[in-house]
Amino acid sequence: MDWVDLRSDTVTRPTAAMRQAGFAAEVGDDVMGDDPSVNALQERLAGDLGFEAGLFVPSGTQSNLLALMAHCERGDEYLVGMDAHTYKYEGGGAAVLGSIQPQPIPHAPDGTLPLEAIAAAIKPLGDPHYARTRLLALENTWHGRPLPLDYLARAGELARSRGLGYHLDGARLFNAAVACGVPAREIARHFDSVSVCLSKGLGAPVGSVLVGSKDLVGKARRWRKVLGGGWRQAGLLAAMASHALDHHVARLADDHRRAAALADALRAIPGLSVEGAFTNLLFVTLPDGKREALTAHMESRGIRIAGGYGTRLRLVTHLDVDDAGLARTIAAFREFFAA
Ligand SMILES: *Cc1c(COP(=O)(O)O)cnc(C)c1O
């Protein structure tokens, strides 16, 4: 069956042209710094985003962890959103593997961390009661929502004025850039380091890139090796990721348009409330007790949605959801809720 899979934008499969790019890639031993395709990807993305260096890694989780471990040492602290991926969905890696204490901060409804809350969470310097606050970490897009550009600047000024590093979990940085109508560099330039996923909406099979200063990326490279993330002929993957950057950035606007169309159609169904669709993610609140039956109904129509038992359902559009898949999804929702 030709599935429409709305569970995540990580489910995309490499296109024929992308597979060809991997097939044709020149490779070498990346642990020795010899892989030309990896080096090209790293240099290109660092250059595009306005940084000195980049590091290609297997996952966004590893990329964020390496950034935290490069910014912070044992006994340091980072400020992070209470629902941020880095804090909540990465297995507590900063604490477990980096001995870095997270200081979670509640999000405002638009996903920002209020500047007063950030300022109040920074610990006094030189007092041994406290962990040393070293870093502010943000996430953009936030649950599919781009953070306001002027907020990124103001939070950056605050971080700098207090001597903190400033990291962005930009797993969906390019979605944010496309939605804001600015080059990704306009978002990235506020930060000291940025992690970008290539395996989500951009459609590469594997990989993220961490960009930052030469010094920071050098530290991250060391931790990558320590974590067992040093890879060899990774150029096969890097070439596919470069292909994604060449061909799949502007088209993110199609995913956003389809998410917005899906949100509009679902809003018109009585009993459903819909939030989001700022980019490629939307959230549907279902009537109580319908989730399991809905999941089964969608499955029977060749549509995969995230399982689970809550009433809040996340739907994600991406490279492998076309207009026909969108129409099939809308029809299947209407059919279920009309019954
Ligand atoms: C997916 C994601 C990550 C982690 O990426 P993986 O490659 O799945 O480890 C980090 N941050 C955000 C916001 C994400 O959506």
Image (cartoon, rainbow, N blue to C red):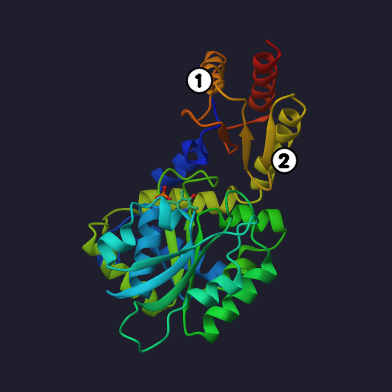
Question: In which image quadrant can residue 4 be found?
Answer: top right
Q: Identify the residue at horizontal 60%, vertical 37% (top origin).
A: 317
Q: Which residue was labeled with disc 1?
A: 292
> Given the image, on which type of amino acid does mark 1 rest?
Glu
Q: Identify the residue at horizontal 35%, vertical 62% (top origin).
A: 65
Q: Is residue 102 left or right of residue 18?
A: left
Q: Is residue 202 in view from this perspective? A: yes
> Given the image, on which type of amino acid does mark 2 rest?
Arg
The percent position of residue 329, horizontal first and vertical second, equals 64, 23
- Pick whichever of labels 2 and 1 is earlier in the sequence: 2
Distance in Å between CA atoms under marks 2 and 1: 28 Å
**Marks 2, 1: nearer the viewer:** 1
Q: Which residue was labeled with disc 2?
A: 257
Q: Is residue 241 left or right of residue 328?
A: left
The percent position of residue 294, horizontal first and vertical second, equals 56, 19
The percent position of residue 144, horizontal first and vertical second, equals 60, 49
